[in-house]
Structures are given as C-alpha cells and as structure tokens.
Image (cartoon, rainbow, N blue to C red):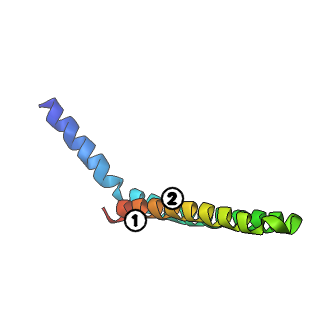
C-alpha cells in the first residue's frame, strides 16, 4: 500500500513540474540559437582573418569554414528539435 502512495506522489511531482520543463525548453532553445550564431560568426571571422593573412589559402579556408558551419548547424538543429519535443510533450 505504501508503494502505491509513493508512486502517486512521484506522478504528482512530475505533473507539477511540466510548466517548468516547458520554460526550460524555451530557454534552452534560445541558448542553442545564440550559441550557434556565435560559433558560426567566430568561424567566419577566423576564416576571413586567415584569408587576409595568406590570400593563397582562401579556397581551403572557405571549404573548412563551410564544413564547420554545417556541422554546427546540424548540432544546433538537433538540439532545437529536442527542446521543441520537450516543450510539446
């Protein structure tokens, strides 16, 4: 009988935290977006600086920049999907 009461308390605690989970998911989505923007801007800045120092490596710097930006976008998109799933569920 005490196990049933304990399980009911756990379920009630989870139900009470649902709005906080949605708030946390919204904040996490914002942080992910800001982080991805900062990361991609830093990559672009570094590639531009490398190209300015050595113009002959412009093609290699641009290729590396595009690949890195695509990887950051992929990770941030995955994180946003997880945040939205938490917010909807």
| Residue 68, numbered circle | none
- The percent position of residue 62, horizontal first and vertical second, equals 70, 68
Rendered image quadrant of residue 33: bottom right
* Residue position marked by numbered label 1 in the rendering: 84
Judge the density around disc 1: few (<14), some (14-19), many (≥20) Cα neighbours within 10 Å: some
- The percent position of residue 49, horizontal first and vertical second, equals 82, 65
Q: Residue extending furthest top?
A: 2
Q: In this orientation, which residue lies closer to the viewer: 45 or 32?
A: 45
Say which residue appears at 18% left-offset and 37% top-offset: 5
Say which residue appears at 17% left-offset and 32% top-offset: 3
Disc 1 versus disc 2: nearer the observer: 2
Judge the density around disc 2: few (<14), some (14-19), many (≥20) Cα neighbours within 10 Å: few
The quarter in which the N terminus is drawn is top left
Q: Residue extending furthest right?
A: 53
Nearer the N terminus, badge 1 or badge 2? 2
**Label 2: which secondary element:** helix
Q: In this orientation, which residue lies closer to the viewer: 18 or 26?
A: 26
* In-image side of 52 versus 9 (left or right): right
Q: CA distance from mark 1 to mark 2?
A: 14 Å
* In-image side of 89 versus 28 (left or right): left
* In-image side of 67 versus 44 (left or right): left
The quarter in which the C terminus is drawn is bottom left
Labelled pair 1, 2 in contact (Cβ < 8 Å): no
**Label 1: which secondary element:** helix
* Residue position marked by numbered label 2 in the rendering: 75
Say which residue appears at 75% left-offset and 65% top-offset: 47
Where 6 falls versus 42 (above or below)? above
- The percent position of residue 60, horizontal first and vertical second, equals 72, 63
Rendered image quadrant of residue 54: bottom right
Rendered image quadrant of residue 78: bottom left
Asked whether residue 27 appears in the rendered view, the answer is no
């Amino acid at each position: 009988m005490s196990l049933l009461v304990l399980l009911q308390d756990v379920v009630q605690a989870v139900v009470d935290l649902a709005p906080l989970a949605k708030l946390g998911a919204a904040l996490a989505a914002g942080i992910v977006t800001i982080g991805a923007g900062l990361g991609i801007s830093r990559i672009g800045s570094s590639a531009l600086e490398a190209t300015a120092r050595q113009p002959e490596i412009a093609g290699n710097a641009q290729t590396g920049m595009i690949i890195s930006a695509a990887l950051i976008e992929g990770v941030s998109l995955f994180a946003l999907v997880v945040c939205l799933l938490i917010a909807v569920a």
